[in-house]
Amino acid sequence: MEKIWLKSYPPGVPAEIDPGLYSSVSDLFDESFREYRERPAFVCMGKEITYGEVDTMSRKLAAWLQSKGLARGARVAIMMPNVLQYPVAIAAILRAGYVVVNVNPLYTPRELEHQLKDSGAEAIILLENFAVTLQAVIRNTAVKHVVVAAMGDLMGTKGLVVNLVVRRVKKMVPAWKLPGHVKFNAALADGARREFTPVKQQPDDIAFLQYTGGTTGVAKGATLLHRNLIANVLQSQIWLEPARVTRPDIDQFITVVALPLYHIFALTVCGLLTIRTGGLGVLIPNPRDISGMIKELQGYKITTFPAVNTLYNAMLNHPDFGKLDFSNLLAANGGGMAVQEVVAKRWYEKTHAPIIEGYGMSETSPCVTCNPSTVTSYSGTIGLPLPSTEISIRDDEGNEVPLGQPGEICIRGPQVMAGYWNRPDETAKVMTPDGFFKSGDVGLVSEAGYIKIVDRKKDMILVSGFNVYPNEVEDVVAKLPGVFEVAAVGVPDQHSGEAVKLYVVKKDQALTDADIFAYCKEQLTGYKRPKLIEFRAELPKSNVGKILRRELRDGRA
């Protein structure tokens, strides 16, 4: 498909980016730490740290990691919500020559063990609130070095109060025991006495293993190279530029970092892009606490707010929403799940800034398409391909379909992953011979080059912007004594877009939905758990015995 979308590009946005601007993410960090040294880089619960401080602390932590004798390219996991230690840890791991493995801190022991074993992580930096999860599985993994952070570590004297409240008042830290662990601040102090050896990384070195279900249920690591992330940061920056140039009076851009940094959308658009542009990231450790989040954001003139539909909707419905200052808001980037028209319209009425819907995935670092940053109305599309990005709409045989016809969205560009970590067979399934990544989403391209998603080829369920794979949920539930057969499907949900529904055939008639809900609570993190359970005498199957999820989902069975 010729790049028909270029004719719809906003003025000043080039067709291509220069991905060779930096040889690594560490180079990008070095430049920003030098250029914006005195500026605040991140703030959490009222405590700011400057670019200079992120530079100094990450060098200390990098020196500590290097002193452990980890080989170049070793995987180091991070298991934290959005706290000040997170950006410090990312910078430290990359600058030391290692690979970041982002882990959802709410994972159950089963989910954590899979990710640590699959990645081969040898070290982990985590918040004490989640140490008990690691304690349950560490002996089954290759992890030898554990750094445990507390919420208030980098907050000075205020941090003592924060830690007291978190541990004693709110009782958010279950008792844990990890022999040989090192406290975060102790690792910084130890690293300060050691020599940090800068590591010169190449564009094709691995930067992140970003775990995703891909097209099947088992979580796989999307192997993201330094050049993938740099390309996507530059693509995102160029795309937002038409909105940014309308406000030359704004000295520093302030981004709300409410999406968790372990999620690829937040990592690139809230984390790396903020650092690249010398912005200030307002870290929100718990975005489910809408009251707390609004309190944290008061007093900041927010300029960019990347989020998912559910978060925008929850904020709009909160009585304190009007207390926030949106006079500098240029763009709210909506991703992760479809933005609803009613939410987009209400948001624009209240803030006078649009929700700009885009599209991406872990395998593409993540941004692939986006609506122009200067739009004012809801389009219902996922926008135009970003600079240096090609989209091809193909049928099941891999042939391009005519313009306006639906087919699988296939993506080629510098942000596309190198493949799935240690899974060449899975990589082969999603890459075409001519280098396109097969998304599994069905879409079409309009005459003007705008892309619209019309369906999903795979059975994935999208809950508040998080992928849930039916295979994984079914595998877990099938292990419960009393279950004969199970199918998991996505059903519409007003709050989260979709919710997980289980269809279960009983082996033991005494089995109840309460049994299944309780079991899933132990085995699956919150967004993967079923909301609805329906018992059936039998499930619809194909002539080879495959359970037909689509028939259940469409109500045909």
Image (cartoon, helix red, strand yellow):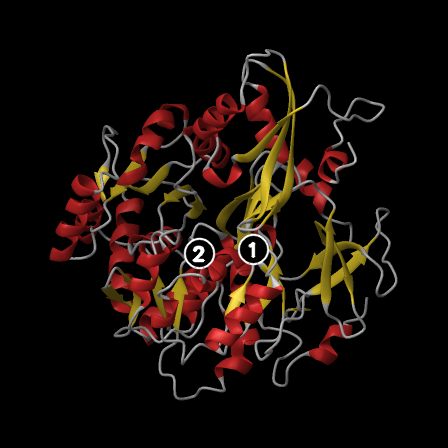
Camera-side residue of 310 and 384: 310
Residue 54 visible (yes or no): yes
Q: Residues within 10 Å of mark 1 (few under 14, many from 20)?
A: many
Where residue 57 sits in the image (x, y, percent)?
Answer: 25, 57
The label on residue 259 is 2
Indicate which disc residue 336 carries. Answer: 1
In the displayed structure, 2 sits above or below 259; it is below
Task: Tell me residue 401's x, y (percent).
Answer: 86, 58
Residue 235 appears in the picture as rendered: no
In the rendered image, residue 43, in percent from the top left (x then y), is placed at 28, 64
Q: Is residue 77 above or below residue 203?
A: above
Q: Residue at x 32, y 42 (%)?
A: 126
| Along the line of sight, the residue nearer the viewer: 327 or 279 | 327
Instruction: Give how far apart the Cα atoms at labels 2 and 1 are.
Output: 10 Å
> Which mark is on residue 47?
none
Q: Secondary structure at mark 2?
A: loop
Circle 2/circle 1 CB separation < 8 Å: yes
